[in-house]
Image (cartoon, rainbow, N blue to C red):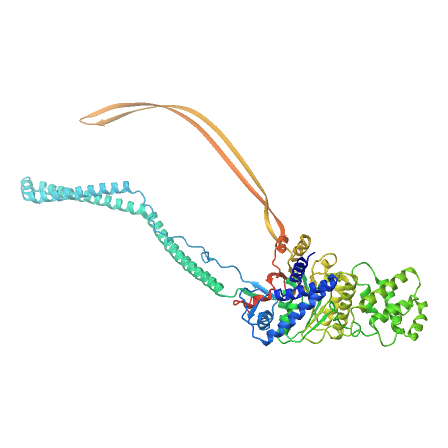
Amino acid sequence: MTAETDRESWRRHFAEILVSGDPAEVDAATEAAVAATAVGADWAAANAAGKAAGKRFRAGTAKAGDARSAGGPSQDGRAKVWADDPAGREVAWPRQLATRLFATPERWGWQAAPGPLQVSEPAEPEPAPRPEWVEPPRPDTSALRVARSSAVTSLTVSVVVAVLAYTAYRSFQTKLEATVDEFGAETMKVYQVAVILAAAALGLYVVRRAAGVGKAVRDIRTFEIPHRAMLVVEKRRYREAVQAWEAAVRRFSAAAAESEQAATRQANGPQWFPVRPAVEPIRVDVVGGDPRRHGWASLLVTVGTSVLSARRQVTLLDFTGQDVGGGLLRVAEASGRVVRVADFDDGAGADLLASVPSQELPGCLARVMTGGDGGDKRQERALLTDVLRVVLECLGGDVSFARLAAGVRVLRQGTGDGLLSDAEVSSLVGRVAEVDQNEWTSRQLRFLASSLNTLQGFSSTGPRPPWGDGAVSLVITPGRRDDAKDLLDRMLVQLAQRAMERGGLRGVLAVAGADRLGAEDLGVLSDHARRAGVLLMLMIDQPQGDLEKTVGTGGVVCVMKMYNHRDANVAAEFVGRGYRFVVNQVTRQVGKSFTDSGGDSFAATTSQSGGTHRRRRYGWVSGTDISNSRGHTWTGTRGWQTGDSIGVSTASSRVYEFVVEPQQILGMPETAFLLVDNSGHGRRVVMADGNPGICLLDRVATVPADQ
């Protein structure tokens, strides 16, 4: 491998593991690793040298950033924000994030605002066109009008005749009366009666014709009564339809205006809303995450600053070796808060035994040696506890892992390697008989001594305990996977449990890479945190095995991006399933019937009648009438009847589907997460983003979207 290829390999490596992503920091770490490799260092030593150089670079730029004013933040909303100044490219994002994150209320992330509203689609449907008045069809009164016209004509004729008769009578009245008077008084009387009768007949004729006209008019009016009633009803319905249309127009206009106002408010309103659980949980499980741990680092910055704003402490046990807590540490430093770092990866660890009382030390170390999933280990734990108690009783006040390992070797009939005094060796030799000398016990003691020696390599005379009273305490262990790291991780967990019991660890305890500890140890840690009132945040990469059964027991789960399909299915199952009704069967039945019937009949009738009559006309006349009648009737009938019947039936079933599909979890952004909140009443699932750079945007709300 050439030097240039080696350099590029280290550059890619540090670009992946350094959370800040600062090219200058990556270059500093790369040069240190290449220099260490050039002098013969192995990969682990070169990696440690590169990480140390990166930390020194961060410390130097942070001090320089405090001494000089940084430029303005970028407007892209990302967590990595850079500023340029005359001295070169400075890392300014911790100061910028600290200014905004510590000024906003509590939040775990941000929820994106809903999409833009469609102004053209208000809630109320668009009304139809204005109703138009259509005159109902008038009834056919043509026959009645013809009858009325005939009656009017007859009345006119009768009136004309009466007028003419009266005129003629008045014209010839004198002559007529003179002529009649010649025939005597009797004739005059007959004349007068005749005139009266003629006048009465003529008047009756006119009256009857007038009555015919009135009857024709009444017939027309009577025939039009239903039409007039229907016309009144239709006019009332038309007025009601117009009123309903006007009301619909007003509602549509109001809905359209409200929709437009809502769209305007949304267009000008916040684009991000803070998200937090309804009630503070007792445990938070962060499941999934990208391999570079950018998602975990972003979530820690967002949640951690929210906790720090409430004047609470944050303690992070970083078991990933990928600097998950570096972002939170730098933001807290930029805000002027006290931070504390115990990095066991570069040898600047802590005294792992100083904070454990001697009476609790045997049980604590026994738990460390037998931790993890792997069956019932109570017998091994009991043996190790007894052995360590014997060793502690024989040792003086100076207790270290190396001296404990030497004491265990003495019980195995070995030597103290110069770490024990003669009196201590004699005391231990005198108690060798208390330990069974069989193969199983010998293996357990050998394992105990080896493990104690391993822990001695991590223990130092540094600050004790690994965490302190500062706002942020960061404990970092190596990122490799071996027995030594597992022992160190479990030892730190035991120390955290005892610190919570005594009140030395408060606020929030976050464990990154907690799935390596096992479900049993995490359950014990959760019980200690619950009793101590400490919020426990467990960051689990893959919720498999017994861990799957314990996820969500604290009330809140943050599901982040998954890369394995099985893990995505587990996460989708935890989020839950919704149900809906689906038509799964449609039955159509069609029937047709036809009936044909017919018949005929014939009838014949014959009748005869006769009679005699007499009448008088110019004498008596008699006659006889005879009539015969015959009739034939033939009737034929034919009937057809057809019928069609169509029946359609549907059957629906209740189906359950994922609320969030596994493929959606596989395709989530690195900093996005699903907040599954069971802490309050009910259960809610919210899609949020933990990228702390969102706080640098302009349109970020300070209250949740549902408030």
Residue 99 place in picture, x, y as percent = 58, 73
Which residue shows up at 24% across the image and 26% down it? Answer: 614
Q: For residue 305, what is the image quadrant? A: bottom right
Against 126, is 357 above or below?
Answer: below
Name the one closer to the observer, 265 or 164: 265
- On screen, residue 331 versus residue 383, left or right, reads left
Q: Is residue 680 visible?
A: no
Residue 685 place in picture, x, y as percent = 61, 60
Name the one closer to the observer, 461 or 279: 461
Residue 283 place in picture, x, y as percent = 69, 66
Q: How many marks?
A: 0
Which residue shows up at 49% across the image and 33% down it? Answer: 642
Task: Name the image quarter holding the C terminus.
Answer: bottom right
- On screen, residue 146 versus residue 116, left or right, reads left
Against 596, is 320 above or below?
Answer: below
- On screen, residue 278 versus residue 146, left or right, reads right
Task: Name the image quarter holding the N terminus.
Answer: bottom right
Residue 490 place in picture, x, y as percent = 77, 66
Q: For residue 692, what is the image quadrant? A: bottom right
Against 247, is 279 above or below?
Answer: below
